[in-house]
Amino acid sequence: MELETSISDNFLKLFSKEIECDIKDTNSKLNLHVLKIENNQFCYSELIENLRNHFISFSLSRKEIADFVKDKRYGELYERAASKFRDYNVNEGEAGELLLFCFLEAHLKAPKILTKLEIKLSSKDYAKGSDGIHLLKVSDKNYQLIFGESKLEQKLTTSISHAFNSIHDFITRSKNNIKDEIGLINSQLGKEAFDEDLYQFLKSVIVPSANEVNPITKNNAFAIFAGFEIKPTDAEKKLSNDKFLELIKKKIKDEVEGKIDHIKKKLDEYKLHNYTFYVYVFPFMQMSKTRKDIIKKITLAEK
């Protein structure tokens, strides 16, 4: 009995995979996926259409979705999912949370256990804690509970720094910490399990027993989505499509590779080498506008 992902590999067809590597001397993995580029622009319209197909699985529990589908209440299902998002005019973070969810499901093959959005009672609620929790099967009887943290900042260094700072705080603070979050997951499992067998399996992974003959091993891990802005110059925008594509990908790749030492520095600073980190780096053009447009259009706040 296993929990399944809700997003297929097709999501990844929107991106070119530029970096997928282990970060030397750490337990961290770095991933850079660059959104498809046409006519010297990122294909945001295709991304938004794709995210519109997946945001329901992100913002609602499996059981809640199943109840709507069973009664064929598809319009209500879409409205309920959209209502969880904050108003796009003041929404600066949930696009990153949604993208991280998609990459963890489609790329890492780690199905969602819980997202911050689905436990909100209204769009105005603020839930302190990880942005989402996913379960990764590393090998037989060996699992990782992955806590997600998304940061979207103009500079990549800032996104990475803020993400590691939030994770360190999440581990060390006295309330609303990682221990409390695991307790929350345990209380919410019934919303993600369709039957008793799946419920018992998830419970055995989240809180494994060490005294069994062949015990389940569970370790906690973290996923970071670090969004940043890439700003092509006016001269670069006037290049031929082929030259622009080659140049912009190189600029992005050089920027990201240049931050590997900064990631290692943060792991050292916060003494986090005992955790596995999955770092997803994502470049935006016109980030401030784009992250709001994503929420506006997937929720049909503006068609």
Image: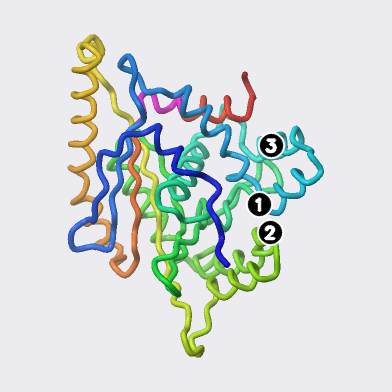
Quadrant placement of the N terminus = bottom right
Q: Secondary structure at mark 2?
A: helix
How packed mark 1 is, by other alpha carbons closer than 10 Å (few <14, some 14-19, many 20 or more), is many
Identify the residue at image location x=40%, y=54%: 223
Label located before the other in sequence (2 or 1): 1
**Residue named by callout 2:** 191
Amino acid type indicated by mark 2: Lys
Magenta-drawn segment: 284-290
Furthest-right residue in this view = 71
**Residue named by callout 1:** 61
**Residue named by callout 3:** 83
Q: Secondary structure at mark 1?
A: loop
Locate residue 235, reporting x and y percent: 20, 11
Disc 1 or disc 3, which is closer to the eye? 1
Furthest-top residue in this view = 238
Amino acid type indicated by mark 3: Ser
Q: CA distance from mark 1 to mark 3?
A: 14 Å
> Badges 2 and 1: C-beta atoms under 8 Å apart?
yes
